[in-house]
Amino acid sequence: MSLAPDTLERIARARADLRMGLPVVLTDAGTGALVISAETLTPARLEAITALPGRAELTLTARRAETLKARPYDVDLARIPLPDGATQDWIRALADPADDLVHPMKGPLVAAREGSAQIHRVALKLAKSARLLPAVLVLGVADPMRFAHESDLTLLPAGPTSALLEEASTMQSVVSARLPLAVSEAGRLHVFRPEDGGEEHYAMEIGQPPRDKPVLARLHSACFTGDVMGSLKCDCGPQLRGALTQMGAEGAGVLLYLNQEGRGIGLANKMRAYSLQDQGFDTVEANHRLGFEDDERDFRLGAELLQRMGFASVRLLTNNPRKIAMMEKAGIAVTERVPLKVGENPFNQAYLATKARKSGHLL
Ligand SMILES: Nc1nc2c(ncn2[C@@H]2O[C@H](COP(=O)(O)OP(=O)(O)OP(=O)(O)O)[C@@H](O)[C@H]2O)c(=O)[nH]1
Ligand SMILES: [Zn+2]
């Protein structure tokens, strides 16, 4: 076996590179381009990029382009050729909506129509998977393999990278150990690690639920602010504790703690969304202004963890119909929806109402 990294392993490297402000190189059908995150771009690297031949394109999702009134000619994204003398601040202001209301007029921004957007599309996916703002600078390079080699940059083929980013990663069971909880002394925590080098996920098993019967289950997405800090802006903390309490009372259950903070956009972006919410946008609008979809989570992960633990059917504690649909689609039967309505307060009333109105949450 070769010691060199395969594409999946290179993707994990690329995520780390982008987060540190390093470029990566993507190839597609004989072409290639340097890609760097707009969020972590430094003035020195911008200078190095503008010194290269060609014109870099700032690539934004159609969601972000809509706010900026740039035409997304590539349907799901817009490519804005970098004007001469564009500064890091200019790029940052297009990528990050923090100051949209203070400096609303960024344009007019004329998006590119010519050329393939395939590398740009995969670059945005990579930025999202690195939990960065979905905004990247892309500059075509003539000999991508040589370019990557000379600058010691991670080189990735766009097509396979895109396919791997779409796939649900295989989970390895790392360890499990007894963990007595306040709600039940018969607790056991399982740790799972994805093969793609992404975040670990956990399963809290209460009692010894029989594998051949529907288990009381909850797919809980991490919420540092709600679960740990006791934030009043959402209902996550009370939902987490409510689910565990119910499992303790029934003597059996499994709570999957999925590290999909902020509906899959990461804590930094969720805090950016919270800032926008303080400017008057709701939870869905804030995600869109940042360039994300309403919900970037992939619940196949939850189904895979349940299957690995030997469960085929669940009584699912949720108010979210998408979770039920995605469980069923991934092969886990949902025999019953168990409502989980706890923790409403004056600070999260509007948030819960928005989820019911725009995201179809059941009341
Ligand atoms: N992007 C974003 N994420 C948020 C916001 N408020 C809470 N979250 C995240 O939303 C997720 C909440 O997940 P869940 O508890 O699974 O909630 P749900 O999808 O409403 O489904 P159920 O609780 O099962 O009904 C957590 O990852 C939170 O971090 C917000 O305003 N913006
Ligand atoms: Zn929360």
Image (tube, rainbow, N blue to C red):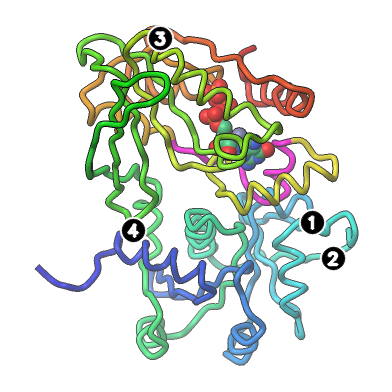
Say which residue label 2 marks.
Answer: 107
In the picture, residue 84 is in which quadrant? bottom right
Which one is earlier in the sequence, the residue at label 1 or at label 2?
1
Q: CA distance from mark 4 to mark 1?
A: 31 Å
Q: In which quadrant is the C terminus drawn?
A: top right
How many other residues sit within 10 Å of disc 1, few (<14), some (14-19) or many (≥20)? Answer: many
User: Element under label 3?
Assistant: helix
Q: Nearer the viewer, residue 97 or 77?
A: 97
How many other residues sit within 10 Å of disc 4, few (<14), some (14-19) or many (≥20)? Answer: some
Q: CA distance from mark 1 to mark 2?
A: 8 Å
Give the residue type at disc 1.
Leu
User: Element under label 1?
Assistant: helix
Q: Quadrant of ligand 1?
A: top right
Give the residue type at disc 3.
Ala
**Mark 3 or 2, which is nearer the eye?**
3
Task: Answer yes or no: is residue 185 visible.
Answer: yes
Say which residue label 3 marks.
Answer: 249
Question: Badges 4 and 1: C-beta atoms under 8 Å apart?
Answer: no
Which one is earlier in the sequence, the residue at label 3 or at label 2?
2
Where is residue 14? Give x, y as percent: 41, 67
